[in-house]
Image (tube, rainbow, N blue to C red):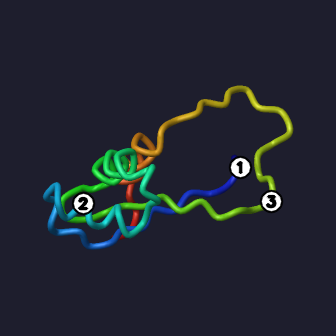
């Protein structure tokens, strides 16, 4: 759970249902296609498919925390895009 997050984006201009389905078929096993479609749709913004990359790192959180709030990847993406420092 402890890792920095990096947002990456890939051009994804055709956001039609069939284009997304074909992309997901290339990336996911058959039993995960429908969930994959929902996930990919949630990560597309303005012709870009975003990915939140979480490299595995050593622990960097302090031993004692005041609060730890789990968030969804979609919420994380929205936060990262609205607080973007670089293009």
Q: In whole angstroms, how far apart are the C-alphas of marks 1 and 2?
A: 31 Å
User: Mark 1 near mark 2, Cβ–Cβ under 8 Å?
Assistant: no
Crowd tier of the residue under label 3, counting other residues whose Cα lies within 10 Å: few below 14, some 14–19, many 20 or above: few
- Counting from the top left corner in percent of width and height, residue 86 is at 38, 68
**Up-down: is 38 above or below 87?**
above
Q: Residue, x 32% and y 45% (percent of image)?
A: 38
Q: In whole angstroms, how far apart are the C-alphas of marks 3 and 1?
A: 8 Å
Q: State the SS at label 2.
A: helix
Crowd tier of the residue under label 2, counting other residues whose Cα lies within 10 Å: few below 14, some 14–19, many 20 or above: some
Quadrant the C terminus occupies: bottom left
Of residues 70 and 37, which is closer to you in this image?
A: 37
59 left or right of 68 in image = right
Q: Quadrant of residue 81?
A: bottom left
Q: Which mark is residue 2?
A: 1
Nearer to us of marks 2 and 3 is 2
Q: Which mark is residue 58?
A: 3
Task: Name the residue beneath numbered marker 2.
Answer: 20
User: Mark 3 near mark 1, Cβ–Cβ under 8 Å?
Assistant: no
Q: Residue, x 17% and y 60% (percent of image)?
A: 18
Q: Residue, x 26% and y 59% (percent of image)?
A: 21
- Counting from the top left corner in percent of width and height, residue 54 is at 60, 60
74 left or right of 65 in image = left
43 left or right of 54 in image = left
State how many labels appear.
Answer: 3
């Amino acid at each position: 759970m402890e890792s920095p997050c990096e947002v990456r984006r890939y051009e994804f201009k055709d956001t039609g249902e069939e284009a997304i389905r074909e992309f997901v078929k290339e990336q996911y096993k058959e039993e995960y296609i429908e969930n994959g479609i929902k996930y990919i749709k949630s990560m597309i913004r303005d012709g870009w498919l975003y990915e939140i990359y979480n490299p595995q790192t050593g622990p960097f959180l302090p031993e004692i925390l005041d609060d730890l709030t789990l968030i969804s990847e979609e919420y994380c993406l929205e936060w990262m895009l609205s607080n973007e420092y670089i293009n």
